[in-house]
Amino acid sequence: MVLTIVMIIESARGRRLAAFLLAATALVTVPLEADADPGTAQRTPSSCAPDALAGLEVVGAEVTAVAAVAHDGGTTRLTVPTGSAMPALSLCEVQLTLTHGVEGGLGPDEAHVWLWLPDEWNGRLQAVGGGGTLATNGPAAMAPALADGYAVVAGDSGVPAARQPNIFLTAEQDFDWQLFENWTYRGVRDMTVLAQAAIEAHYGEPAAYSYWNGCSNGGRQGMAMAQRFPDLYDGVLAAAPAMYGADRLNMTMSWPAVVQNERLGGFLPTCKLAAMRDAVLAACDGDDGVEDGLVSRPELCDYRTALGGVVGTKTPCGKVKKTDAAVVAEIYRGPHEADGRAVWYGHTPGMDLTGGIVRVPPSFALQNFAFADLSYDWRQVSTTDLVGEVRSRLQGRLELLATADPALDTFAATGGKVLMWHGLADGLFPADQSIHYYDEVRTLSGAATDDYFRLFLAPGVDHCRGGVGPQPVDPFDALVRWVEDGDAPDVLPASGPAPDGGDRERGLCPYPQVQVYRGGDPNSAASFDCSSA
């Protein structure tokens, strides 16, 4: 009889990694030298044959097909969409197909895992996440890891492209709990376990380190692994993670459209939004000690006064009215009960009001999550409905999606590290979410939090990238140095174009420290210090 076992691997940092590996009949312990470098490994030609990966197993699912192709890169042969660009490097490209069968009358599902195993391997695994409703961002997200010598893995969590964007509804518009569990966490667990096993089979040795790299839903996926399966990853890079998804995230993302529709009967025109955005920026730009086109201290921003000052301003789409300014103040304030009690965070002063979520109907959340009805018209929802009935429906259905457990002690005890960053001008959901999570973790772990979890805030940066602020420079490399060398990041380098057309450099500060201007060239990182707020 074939048995699934747990192989215990002693990593180069002394961490014990658990991975469900190949069929075997005994428990095997494989120690690595304590100070060994991962090094490089060469495959043999036969090691890329599908038969070499036969027997891969993961608890709760069945691997139904294995495909493997050895080639010299350039374009993908198996990873969808096939023909996508990839580095011109010799590798073994693998596709694994698996299913969880029929569960609760749903299914059977069919999930796919894509694994790139380079000939010139750096001894490490990097898993990359998705974004929005996608469990993976595909070859474009995998390519940089391969170029750096990583074995790299991604997976679709069993969500077929034909189901986009309403991925959680069946053809009968029933909520698909099987795919929801896959997409929420199970698909990532499965692909990680299988990738670690395949690496062992292919190279004849386990990955010395396993890393997660993702933003938005990809950041949430990584945090789900740290919270649920703390032995799987040595390091997690979680940028702008979409945590608190059970109800609070959807409250914040739905609020701007609902409050505009309720108060104005439709969306504010972009020219009025631009005028109010610019007024808030002008009023709050200097709160960090320098006017540089960035709101670096949004918690100090008196946006109500700034919005009041723009009332009556002429724009190409009419004067800014008092009711217009009041609606934008509500967007910044965020969802709240009729008696004023806050439900969750609002959007951040300094974000671009003309983009992001401000003018996006919340049809997806309401039709897919709250009512399982693609004909449901979001415009019938009031702010009272949103924080009442809709919130209750979301809480009952989406608890798996919350991904906000602050108890990371087991992950920390294994030596795991989390490097999180979030743009302060995020147009989809605010950095206050990540701050809230960090504060909850610190409440449990105290000063020891800094030993394994650091959060960096990026002024002027939008969701995952973009915006007018300096972008983080290679935060993944900072995570690797922290995990492997113990070099904890005290600042996170960031760079981008300056307003005058030159370059702007900053050192992003670990929360709760903030950037403080000390004088000199505002485009130079040396002109700022990190200080307690």
Image (cartoon, rainbow, N blue to C red):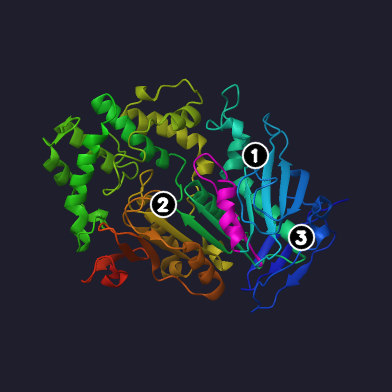
Res. 465 mark: 2
Picture residue at 74% right of the left edge, 56% below the top = 198
Marks 1 and 2: CB-CB under 8 Å? no
Report x, y in % for residue 320: 16, 34
* Among the two numbered marks 3 and 1 on one chain, the one whose residue lies closer to the N terminus: 1
Amino acid type indicated by mark 1: Gly
Amino acid type indicated by mark 3: His
* Among the two numbered marks 1 and 2 on one chain, the one whose residue lies closer to the N terminus: 1
- In which quadrant will I find the C terminus? bottom left
Amino acid type indicated by mark 2: Arg
Residue 508 appears in the figure? no
Report x, y in % for residue 510: 37, 65
Task: Judge whether 255 appears above or below 532 on screen.
Answer: above
Task: Judge whether 240 appears above or below 160 on screen.
Answer: below
Res. 393 mark: none
Report x, y in % for residue 80: 64, 42
Magenta residues? Answer: 123-148
Find the residue positioned furthest to the right. Answer: 1
Report x, y in % for residue 465: 41, 51
Which residue bears the numbered disc 1?
158
